[in-house]
Amino acid sequence: MVAFAWAYVVGIYVHENIKQIKIKKHGNRAKSLFKYGLQTIAAALLNPFTKLDFNIFEFLSCT
């Protein structure tokens, strides 16, 4: 449950502040906020040299 919440919150943050998810012609997003956040977290964990615009681990510690 904690991992789901973390991925969802990161997805919302990235969508609102960094890069918006594209809206398709039928009005739905191209991918979910959960998947967007999960991809961001996975990119940060699997490639430590990736420069992100924010500290991904601050979301987990809630600071």
Image (tube, helix red, strand yellow):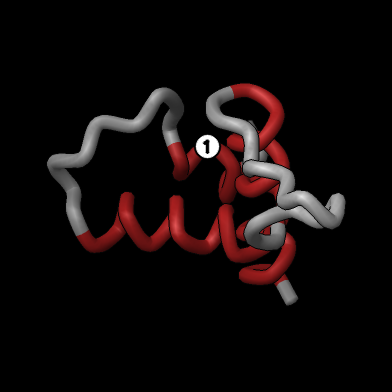
Horizontally, residue 62 falls left or right of residue 27, namely left
Q: SS class of the residue under badge 1?
A: helix
The percent coordinates of residue 29 (x first, y second) are 74, 53
Position of the C terminus by quadrant: top right
Horizontally, residue 43 falls left or right of residue 47, namely right
The percent coordinates of residue 13 (x first, y second) are 66, 35
Residue placed furthest toward the bottom:
1
Position of the N terminus by quadrant: bottom right
The percent coordinates of residue 7 (x first, y second) are 62, 59
In this figure, what is the number of numbered marks?
A: 1
Q: Nearer the viewer, residue 10 or 60?
A: 10
Amino acid type assigned to the residue bearing label 1 in the image: Glu
Residue placed furthest toward the left:
49
Horizontally, residue 47 falls left or right of residue 2, namely left
Give me the residue at 45% from left, 51% from top: 40
Horizontally, residue 34 falls left or right of residue 39, namely right
Give me the residue at 69% from left, 70% from top: 4
Quickly name the residue at label 1: 58
The percent coordinates of residue 21 (x first, y second) are 63, 42
Give me the residue at 45% from left, 27% from top: 54
